[in-house]
Amino acid sequence: MADSGRLPARVSSALEAISRVARALNAPGALHEVADRALDAMRATLDLEAAVLYLPDAGGRPLIVRFTGDQARDQLDFDPAAWQLAIAGGHPLVFNEPAGWLVPNPFDPPAAHWMVVPLATAERLVGAVVAARAEPVALDALGGTVLSLLGDQLAAGIESAQLRLQLQGAAIERERLRLAADVHDGLAQDLALAVRELAFLDGGPPAAGAEASRARLRAAVGSAHGVVRDRLVDLSSTLPIGGLRAAVEEVCARYALRGLAVRLDADAAVGQAPPAVTAALVRVVNEALANALKHAEATAVDVRLVADPGAITVVVADDGRGFDPDAAPGAAHGHLGLTLMRGRASEAAGELTVESTPGAGTTVAARFPLPSVA
C-alpha cells in the first residue's frame, strides 16, 4: 500500500528544483557567480543538457545577449511580434521541435526539446534562460507553474546581484571622492607646507627662524599623520549593531578623543533606519565634525538627532570661525567637503543645508525620508 503522506514524485522533484535554485541564489557572490550556481541547480534538478542566461540589450532593442553558459548562440534577435510572445509576455515557452518559426534555434546542433523562460520583475525584464533537454519537456499545469516560479526566483536573484554590483560601484566612488577630499583639503596642504619648511631649513636660516620652521614642520607632519590615521580607522570600521544612534555616538566619541567637545542629543523616538540612510547620515556627521575640527577650529559642537513623522534629521552646529557659504571654494578649487556631504545626503534621497556666518559658527542639517511601514 502506498504511503498516503508521501508527495507524488513529480511534485517532490518540482519542490526540489525550486529549493535548490533558491539556495543557489541566496549564497553571496558577483552576478556571474550567482547566475552560474542557479543554472547549475536548474540543470541538475530538471535534467537539462544546457542552460544559458541571456540579458537584455542595453539599447532596449528586441535582442538578448548571452551572459553565462555555453552551447548556444551569443545573441538572439527577435522580430517585434516574436519578442512580445517569447519574452515580453513573461510566460515560459516550451518547444519539442527545433521551432525556427519563433527565433533561430539557439543551440548547435539545433535542440529538439528546449525552452525559453523569461525573467521579469514587476518593473522590468531582467533576462531570460534558454535551456535544452534530451527528453520532451512537459508544460502541463505543474510544469508551467514550476518554470514560472523558477523564473521569478531567478529574476529576483539576478536583480539583487545587479543591485549589489551597483551599490559596490557607488561605494567605491564615494570612497574615491572622500579620499580625494582628504588629499586636497588636508594631506596635500600639510605635505606642501612640510616641503616648504624643509627647503627653508636647507637654506641655513638663523637659529630663531630655524626653530620656528621646525615647529611648523612638526605640526604639518603631525597633521598629515592624523589624516592618514583617521581615514584608516574610518575605512576599517563598520556600523555598530545598535543602529543609527549607536553609529552617531561612535563618531562623536571618536572626535571627542581628539579634543573636540561634542554634545549629542537624540530624540527618544529615534530608532532603526535603513542601512543606506544610516550610512549616509553617519558620513554627513563625520564630515561635519572633521570640518569643524580642522577648518573651523571649533572648540564645541552640538549634534542633534530629530525624529519627525516619516523622516530623520541630523543637525551639527559648531562654534567655529564660520564662513560665507556663497563665497566658499568648491570642488573645482580642490575643496570637496561640502560637495561630499551633499552627495552622500542625495544618495539616500536626503536634503542637506549649510548655514554659516564668518565669526558665528556653522550649522549643517541633513534630513532623510524614511520608508513607511505598512
Image (tube, helix red, strand yellow):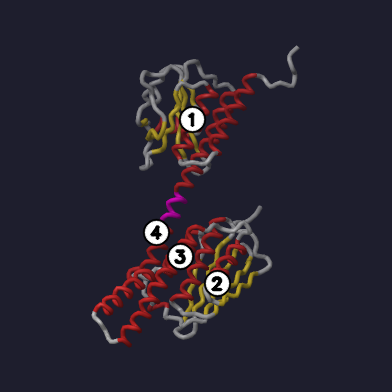
Q: Nearer the viewer, mark 3 or mark 1?
A: 3
Q: Residues within 10 Å of mark 3 (few under 14, many from 20)?
A: few
Question: Vertically, is 42 above or below 373?
Answer: above
Q: Amino acid at mark 3?
A: Arg
From the image, tell me which residue sits under label 3: 229
Per the model, the C-alpha gap separating discs 4 and 3 is: 17 Å
- The mark nearer the N terminus, 4 or 2, is 4
Residue appearing at x 45%, y 55% in the figure: 171
Q: Nearer the viewer, mark 4 or mark 2?
A: 2
Residue 247: within the magenta?
Answer: no
The residue that label 2 is drawn on is 257
Q: Position of residue 18 (x, y in %)?
A: 58, 30
Q: Which numbered disc flags the more N-terminal residue, 3 or 2?
A: 3
Residue 284 in percent (x, y) is at: 50, 66
User: Of callouts 4 and 1, which one flags the residue occurring earlier in the amino acid sequence?
Assistant: 1
Residue at 33 percent across and 74 percent down: it is 194
Query: Which portion, as a residue range, is magenta?
Result: 166-173
Residue placed under numbered mark 4 in the picture: 176
Residue 201, image quadrant? bottom left
Which residue is disc 1 drawn over?
39
Which of marks 1 and 3 precedes in the sequence?
A: 1
Q: Amino acid at mark 4?
A: Arg
Q: CA distance from mark 1 to mark 2?
A: 52 Å
| Left or right: 202, with 342 as reference point | left
- Looking at marks 1 and 2 on the same chain, the residue that comes earlier in the sequence is marked by 1
Residue 303 seen by the camera = yes
